[in-house]
Amino acid sequence: MKRHFALALASLCAPLALVPAMANDTVASINLGGLELSPSAAVTMESEDLYLSEERIRVRYVYANDTSAAEHLMISFPLPMPTAREEEEARETGMYQEWNQLDFQTLIDGKPAPLTRHDVPMVGERSVEARLKQLGFPVLHWRDEGLSDRLNALPDDVASALVAEGILIDDADSGGGAVRNLRPGWMVQTHVTRFQTFPPGEKVVVEHSYRPMVGGSASGSLNRDYRDMALNGPDGLGAPYCIDPPFLAAYDRRVYGGKPAGDPDPGLTVVQTWLGYVLKTGANWLGPIKNFRLVVDKGRPENLVSFCMDGVKKISPTQFEVTRTNFEPIRDLDVFLVEFIVDGEGR
């Protein structure tokens, strides 16, 4: 599997690489239990301009505080947790996401903003930050080479209780073995946080730019022999990416030369990747996003792209635009990208 660090894309077939999507800004606070996200009752998001591409991802917000008092807020830009399959791939390869791979930059009214990283351990939808502190377990467990030995040395009753709590996972159970094999059961969600003032009656412009970690692999899961399972199976691609007949027809024209039967082009490698972006946190501001613009750039004209949004407009050979007014995001954005590589051409 070829890997590099250039964009927030990952393969849709096994093996999978660790892939962070990104998220809209949201208000945050830190209490005894750790970082918490909360809505703002005073600041509105006047506009959001989001650009997703392989080279760089950029988002520009304009906020307004229409009250008579300044708002001093802790703002979080949350990176998502990996999925269970991505976590498994990271565990097998040791390729966990690290801060310096993101090249994350933030400007507030054109000036660089100081940023802080806050790592939140999650079991499902629940933060276990306070619990790990109590137990003395490190949040970034992959950096602690001796953790596995310490976990497997725990008394049986303690280990069983932590497994039941979801803090630990016993791989011996899933493999039918009798020897205990404990590992961390939490996944890590990283938040890029900053403190920011919103002056009364003024607008504030915030810009984020980053080069997220990427993984990818070749896959022919959308070839005719495997298509039904790929689209409708347990991890089906059809619904989350709104893959439709025109998309599949374009795929067949490239892979099969438009022929209704026959084998795929042996000189063509198909790379399937996805890009995710967490939009729902944009609903944490006062009122809807007044003006929202999304541009998805598929990279090369011959690539294919699919995502679930109405009113998609093609604005260039590689770019697709969606605009909304008074937008209240209720779901996150998932983008499916297919790249065709001719043998010897490279990426």
Image (cartoon, rainbow, N blue to C red):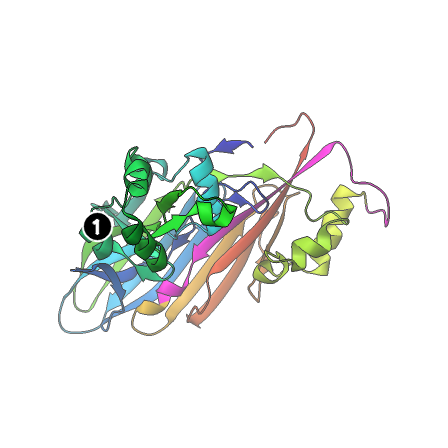
- Depicted 313 relative to depicted 217: above or below: below
- What crowding class fits label 1: few (fewer than 14 Cα within 10 Å), some (14-19), or many (20 or more)? few
Q: In the rendered view of the protein, which quadrant contains the C terminus? A: top right
Whether residue 281 can be seen here: yes
- Depicted 32 relative to depicted 188: above or below: below
> Can residue 292 be found in the magenta stretch?
no
Q: Amino acid at mark 1?
A: Leu
- Depicted 303 relative to depicted 32: above or below: above
> Can residue 278 be found in the magenta stretch?
yes
What's drawn in magenta, residue-wise?
Answer: 258-282
- In the rendered image, residue 261, in percent from the top left (x then y), is placed at 86, 47
- In the rendered image, residue 167, in percent from the top left (x then y), is placed at 32, 53
- In the rendered image, residue 111, in percent from the top left (x then y), is placed at 23, 46
Residue at image coords 65%, 58%: 233
Residue lying farthest top? 344
Residue at image coords 58%, 43%: 14
- In the rendered image, residue 138, in percent from the top left (x then y), is placed at 25, 44
Q: In the rendered view of the protein, which quadrant contains the N terminus? A: top right
Residue at image coords 37%, 44%: 182
Viewer-closest of 21 and 198 = 21
User: Element at badge 1?
Assistant: helix
- Depicted 239 relative to depicted 216: above or below: below
Circle 1 is placed at which residue position? Answer: 135
Residue 13's image quarter? top right
**Number of numbered discs overlaid on the protein picture:** 1
